[in-house]
Image: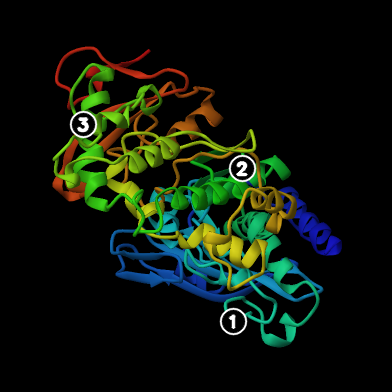
């Protein structure tokens, strides 16, 4: 393994020294189809060139891309060796636009996923001229499936054949690939491939990821700070041992569905959500069904306490109120902080996260990766397990405190790819021009449909500032200030 790292580093260094910057950064279909590589630990599985505006329909276990609006690009599907002893590898994709902007963008995935992020490679990287890199993390699975990390005799979802799988440490090896190694080696391989393909020096390397993608980015920065010149890290699910424990605790706050504390979906959307808005919508100065700073909302669920003879579908009993108090509060075990609570304002979506039944992500993480017990259920969770999970730290994936708002890799695009509206463009201006962003103007589309037009725009302020309504039409960002 050390030899593999050293050899790949040497190859990359040689490319940096050898390649001279050319006036043009263009490639072509012939460049793509003729490409081959001798990069140590990297083999080329497939090469495909897509012409401009080609009809593209791609998918894997995690992501998909259906479009006919991308510029011409070359898709390289690589096998990146992650452990020479076990013969394990990651499936890594490098997408190379015919007209290149001189930058590389590595993009992360989500959940427990095993699949390159095809949507972001296309819509974010190639669409804006970046060479894009993404990996399956050494296994194939959906975002919610942790079975690949389970008992050593079940390897059907890994990249390994059964002969390789019986070698000592296979499952642990797969977890380390997912935890950090596949991303790191894919970054190194990506840099080498990009420079060889264009015969030019890579100008800048960036990262873009959310949720698990945020964790992957933070982990790479912590271990290898020279990998990126800048990184967009959104809602990093980085403190996995605590995040997953919190997720299970959240489910147990309301489950089982037959208990008096269970809160049906309709109560979340039609009773709790409107009351949260009634109490907190006006805190930013305007009534618009948006709580701009949820941390300023001190929601009091007791306002929904059922009165005598009241229809119980329009109010909460004492057990439901107690459950809400726990859900919105920080989670402690024996006086030790584990994770932060939910913020008020997302009640329309909260039921589908943890409250309709056991969430497969934290359940699978404990079942397969921590306890190696396929019969385990969340009813067996207790106060000692989060500490055990921290001590085991499957895949060395823990990266410190993380966010309690996660997801969002499939959000609609900004209204413009400039530094005022696009966070990646703002990062680039910060790195390359020294201008740090003070705010980003975000857009809400009608019915979350880009083609339906913009419903309103709103500034996102740099912490610790919060937005305040200053007057004018609340549909426009310039009616708000960061204070």
Residue 23 can be seen in this image: no
Disc 1: CA contacts within 10 A as few (<14), some (14-19) or many (>=20): some
- In front: 454, or 297? 297
Res 156 label:
1
What residue is at 51 percent from the left and 36 percent from the top? Answer: 340
Residue under label 2: 218
Q: Secondary structure at mark 1?
A: loop
- In front: 342, or 21? 342
What residue is at 33 percent from the left and 62 percent from the top? Answer: 52
Marks 2/3 in contact by CB < 8 Å: the verdict is no
Mark in the foreground, 1 or 3? 3
The x and y percentages for residue 115 are 51, 66
Indicate how the structure is coloured in the image. Answer: rainbow
Q: Earlier in the sequence, mark 1 or mark 2?
A: 1
The x and y percentages for residue 90 are 63, 68
Q: Secondary structure at mark 2?
A: helix
What residue is at 50 percent from the left and 46 percent from the top? Answer: 208
Residue under label 3: 289
Work out which quarter of the rendered image holds the N terminus and state it. bottom right
Cα distance between the residues tagged 1 and 2: 30 Å
Q: Earlier in the sequence, mark 1 or mark 3?
A: 1
The x and y percentages for residue 286 are 20, 20
Q: State left or right for residue 115 relative to residue 321.
A: right
């Amino acid at each position: 393994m050390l030899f593999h790292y050293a050899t790949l580093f040497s190859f990359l260094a040689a490319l940096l020294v050898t390649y001279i910057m050319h006036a043009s950064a263009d490639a072509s279909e012939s460049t793509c189809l003729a490409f081959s590589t001798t990069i140590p630990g990297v083999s080329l599985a497939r090469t495909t060139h897509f012409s401009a505006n080609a009809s593209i329909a791609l998918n894997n276990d995690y992501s998909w891309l259906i479009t006919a609006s991308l510029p011409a690009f070359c898709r390289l599907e690589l096998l990146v060796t992650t452990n020479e002893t076990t013969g394990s590898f990651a499936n890594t994709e490098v997408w190379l636009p015919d007209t290149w902007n001189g930058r590389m963008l590595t993009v992360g995935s989500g959940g427990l996923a095993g699949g390159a992020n095809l949507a972001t490679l296309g819509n974010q990287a190639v669409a804006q001229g970046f060479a894009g890199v993404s990996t399956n993390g050494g296994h194939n699975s959906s975002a919610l499936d942790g079975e690949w990390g389970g008992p050593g005799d079940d390897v059907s979802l890994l990249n390994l054949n059964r002969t390789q799988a019986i070698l000592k440490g296979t499952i642990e090896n797969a977890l380390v690939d997912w935890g950090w190694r596949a991303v790191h080696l894919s970054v190194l391989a990506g840099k080498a491939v990009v420079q060889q393909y264009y015969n030019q020096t890579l100008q800048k390397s960036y990262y873009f990821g959310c949720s698990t993608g945020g964790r992957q980015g933070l982990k790479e920065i912590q271990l290898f700070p020279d990998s990126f010149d800048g990184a967009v890290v959104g809602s990093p699910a980085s403190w996995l041992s605590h995040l997953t424990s919190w997720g299970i605790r959240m489910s147990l706050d309301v489950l089982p569905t037959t208990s008096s504390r269970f809160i049906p979906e309709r109560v979340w959307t039609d009773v709790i959500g409107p009351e949260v808005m009634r109490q907190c919508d006006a805190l930013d100065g305007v009534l618009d069904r948006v709580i701009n700073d949820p941390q300023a909302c001190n929601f009091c669920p007791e306002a929904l306490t059922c009165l005598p003879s009241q229809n119980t579908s329009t109010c909460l009993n004492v057990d439901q109120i107690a459950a809400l108090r726990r859900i919105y509060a920080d989670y402690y075990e024996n006086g030790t902080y584990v994770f932060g609570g939910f913020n008020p304002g997302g009640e329309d979506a909260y039921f589908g996260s943890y409250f309709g039944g056991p969430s497969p992500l934290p359940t699978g993480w404990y079942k397969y990766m921590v306890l190696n017990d396929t019969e385990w259920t969340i009813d067996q969770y207790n106060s000692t397990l989060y500490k055990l999970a921290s001590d085991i730290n499957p895949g060395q994936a823990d990266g410190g405190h993380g966010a309690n708002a996660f997801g969002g890799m499939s959000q609609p695009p900004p209204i413009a790819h400039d530094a005022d509206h696009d966070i990646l463009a703002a990062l680039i201006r910060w790195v390359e021009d020294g201008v740090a962003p003070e705010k980003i103007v975000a857009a809400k589309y009608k019915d979350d449909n880009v083609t339906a037009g913009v419903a309103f725009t709103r500034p996102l302020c740099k912490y610790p500032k919060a937005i305040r309504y200053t007057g004018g039409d609340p549909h426009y960002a310039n009616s708000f200030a960061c204070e």
